[in-house]
């Protein structure tokens, strides 16, 4: 059970990282570290951007639940 849970945590974490990386506007790797222009911060999400936002929230919630479950099981 613990090994299956650890594999699920790894899969969800990789998917979460991918979802977060895909949300960047594609202005280069400098923007990922905080650099780059700050325009377009307060825009409404539409289409694929909105789907990625919802997927990232869902994956982060799932990651939190899996991590808490892992801690409770190993006690």
Image: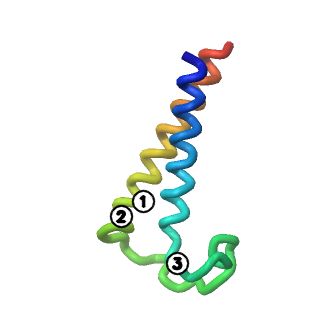
Quarter of the image holding residue 5? top right
- Residue visible at 52% across and 33% down in the picture: 8
Which numbered tag is attached to residue 42?
none
Q: Nearer the viewer, residue 2 or 31?
A: 2
Q: CB under 8 Å between callouts 2 and 1?
A: yes
Q: Tell whether 66 sits left or right of 33.
A: left
- Residue visible at 56% across and 31% down in the picture: 7
Which of disc 3 and disc 1 is earlier in sequence? Answer: 3
- Name the mark nearer the viewer: 3 or 2: 3
- Residue visible at 40% across and 52% down in the picture: 55
Residue 28 vertical position relative to residue 9 in the rendered view, above or below: below
Quarter of the image holding residue 46? bottom left
Residue bearing mark 2: 50
Residue 60 location (% of width, % of height): 51, 45
How far is the residue under mark 3 from the one under mark 2? 16 Å
Residue bearing mark 1: 53
Residue 23 location (% of width, % of height): 48, 67
How far is the residue under mark 2 from the one under mark 1? 5 Å
Q: Residues within 10 Å of mark 3 (few under 14, many from 20)?
A: few
Residue bearing mark 3: 26
- Residue visible at 56% across and 48% down in the picture: 14
Kind of element beneath mark 2: helix
Which of disc 2 and disc 3 is earlier in sequence? Answer: 3
């Amino acid at each position: 059970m613990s090994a299956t849970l650890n594999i699920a945590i790894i899969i969800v974490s990789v998917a979460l990282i991918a979802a977060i990386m895909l949300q960047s506007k594609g202005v280069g790797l400098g923007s990922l570290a905080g650099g780059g222009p700050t325009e377009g911060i307060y825009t409404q999400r539409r289409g694929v951007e909105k789907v990625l936002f919802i997927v990232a929230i869902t994956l982060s919630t799932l990651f939190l639940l899996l991590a808490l479950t892992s801690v409770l099981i190993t006690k």
